């Protein structure tokens, strides 16, 4: 066994007081980041720095606390000695004195504050689970067969509900499932009443109600067991809990919330006068529809009677129809035979068109036609050329010297060189000239010549 005497001085880890306090401070900060502490406020002081210093105690212990100026300005009440408070704080150590203390981050009065925090935590958790979702809510019946009321039988809520139901629609029966709505055990009684009403199976809508009160008074309706029982309930539930400003967990889970018990009663039944007026309108509409249908059926019956035919008449009609079909059959065969004959004639014509004899006949006729056209073309070409030759001869004769001679003129040429004479100086007196006439020639001697 090792004793303190066996540990040498070099093996000892010696802490200074400040180091020890700093290490303890770090351990506290690491293992207790945030805690909720409830206790009685005492030794409260508010120095000029604006920080708060006080002590929280219960019947067996106490702890020092500090709340600095930057955070205590958010506290919405005036702390006083003897007040029960709930604080959220970090565990710390005031190192200069080695005092264990709480550094406060928020403060609220205990009781209602704790309940409100529990309310918000349960509300957020149930909402995440889907207990408030609209898809799980049931529709209320337009006119219930029976109404179940879950409330205290001696409270004001049942009186208000019954008064409203008698005024709006007294014909609907009301069944009261009594339970305690305040105090310990109230939540279990509420759940038992809901389950009893559901097993009973008579009511098709339930009212869960109570009058107004504080948060503590309404707390049974904020219990998780009540919320889950409401969620499992197959009968539509309307809540009318407290006053208009009061909201409970049951209101969020229920199929519909009313601000007061009286308003819940108004939701589950229609107004009798308005309902009777609507019923009268529907009856009148039904009468009109029935009357219209009766008239329509009568017209159809009359038309059906007219359409009814005696079997003999039907047989005669069928016989006539048979004769008509026979005529149509014969006509169809005749048309078919005629069409077939037309088809044969057409094919014969096509076959003749493809025959060599038809081709030779066609080519012979075509050759005769071409020969006739060639003969006419040659004759026309010959006549054309003859006419052209005649016109050309006439034109040539017009410009010919012979034509000039025919008009009485003569062509005079020298006899020795056959040169045509155009003026008197081209010939000498005594020389011979030859005069060519239209018919014949003359040889003459020049006796005289004149220059005119």
Image: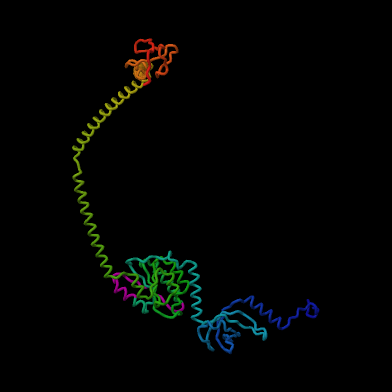
From what the image shows, is residue 367 above or below residue 237? Answer: above
From what the image shows, is residue 321 above or below residue 107? Answer: above
User: Is residue 179 in view from this perspective?
Assistant: yes
Colouring mode (rainbow / by chain / secondary structure / one colour): rainbow
Q: Residue at x 26, y 65 (%)?
A: 279
Q: Residue at x 75, y 80 (%)?
A: 14
User: Percent x, y for residue 230?
Assistant: 43, 69
Q: Nearer the viewer, residue 52 or 375?
A: 375
Q: Nearer the viewer, residue 241 or 432?
A: 432
State the quadrant of the C terminus: top left
Q: Nearer the viewer, residue 274 or 265?
A: 274
**Snapshot quadrant of residue 396:** top left
User: Percent x, y for residue 367?
Assistant: 37, 16
User: Percent x, y for residue 185?
Assistant: 46, 76
Whether the magenta-drawn stretch holds residue 183 is answered as: yes
Magenta residues (range): 161-184
Q: How many marks?
A: 0
User: Is residue 365 in view from this perspective?
Assistant: no
From what the image shows, is residue 122 above or below residue 290? Answer: below
User: Percent x, y for residue 61?
Assistant: 60, 85
Whether residue 185 sits left or right of residue 3 in the image: it is left
State the quadrant of the N terminus: bottom right
**Snapshot quadrant of residue 213:** bottom left
Whether residue 108 sits left or right of residue 433 in the image: it is right
Whether the magenta-drawn stretch holds residue 395 is answered as: no
Q: Nearer the viewer, residue 325 or 238?
A: 325
Q: Residue at x 51, y 73 (%)?
A: 121
């Amino acid at each position: 066994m090792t004793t303190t005497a066996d540990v040498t001085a070099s093996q000892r880890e010696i802490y200074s007081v400040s180091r020890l306090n700093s290490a303890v401070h770090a351990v506290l900060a690491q293992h207790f980041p945030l805690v909720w502490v409830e206790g009685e406020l005492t030794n409260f002081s508010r120095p000029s720095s604006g920080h708060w210093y006080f002590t929280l105690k219960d019947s067996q212990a106490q702890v020092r606390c500090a709340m600095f100026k930057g955070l205590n300005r958010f506290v919405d009440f005036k702390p006083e000695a003897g007040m029960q408070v709930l604080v959220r704080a970090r565990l710390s150590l005031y190192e200069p004195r080695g005092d264990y203390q709480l550094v406060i981050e928020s403060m609220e009065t205990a009781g209602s504050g704790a309940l409100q925090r529990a309310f918000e935590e349960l509300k957020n958790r149930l909402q995440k689970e889907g207990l408030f979702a609209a898809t799980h809510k049931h529709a209320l019946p337009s006119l219930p067969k029976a109404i179940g009321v879950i409330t205290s039988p001696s409270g004001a809520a049942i009186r208000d509900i019954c008064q409203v139901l008698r005024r709006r629609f007294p014909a609907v029966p009301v069944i009261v499932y009594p339970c305690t709505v305040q105090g310990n055990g109230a939540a279990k009684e509420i759940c038992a009443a809901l389950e009893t009403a559901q097993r009973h199976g008579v009511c098709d809508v339930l009212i869960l109600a109570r009058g107004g009160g504080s948060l503590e008074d309404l707390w049974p309706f904020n219990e998780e067991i009540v919320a889950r029982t409401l969620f499992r309930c197959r009968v539509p539930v309307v809540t009318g809990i407290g006053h208009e400003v009061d909201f409970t967990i049951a209101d969020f889970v229920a199929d519909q919330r009313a601000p007061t018990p009286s308003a819940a009663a108004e939701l589950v039944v229609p107004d009798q006068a308005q309902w009777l007026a609507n019923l009268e309108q529907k009856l009148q509409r039904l009468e009109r529809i029935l009357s219209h249908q009766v008239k329509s059926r009568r017209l159809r019956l009359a038309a059906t009677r007219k359409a009814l035919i005696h079997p003999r008449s039907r047989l005669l009609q069928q016989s006539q129809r048979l004769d008509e079909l026979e005529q149509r059959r014969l006509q169809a065969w005749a048309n078919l035979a005629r069409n077939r004959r037309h088809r044969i004639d057409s094919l014969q014509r096509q076959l003749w068109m493809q025959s060599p004899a038809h081709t030779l006949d066609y080519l012979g006729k075509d050759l005769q036609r071409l020969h006739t056209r060639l003969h006419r073309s040659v004759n026309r070409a010959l006549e054309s050329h003859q006419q052209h030759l005649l016109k050309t001869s006439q034109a040539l004769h017009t410009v010919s010297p012979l034509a000039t001679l025919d008009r009485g003129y003569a062509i005079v040429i020298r006899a020795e060189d056959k040169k045509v004479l155009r003026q008197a100086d081209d010939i000498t007196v005594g020389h011979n000239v030859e005069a060519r006439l239209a018919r014949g020639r003359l040889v003459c001697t020049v006796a005289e010549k004149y220059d005119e």
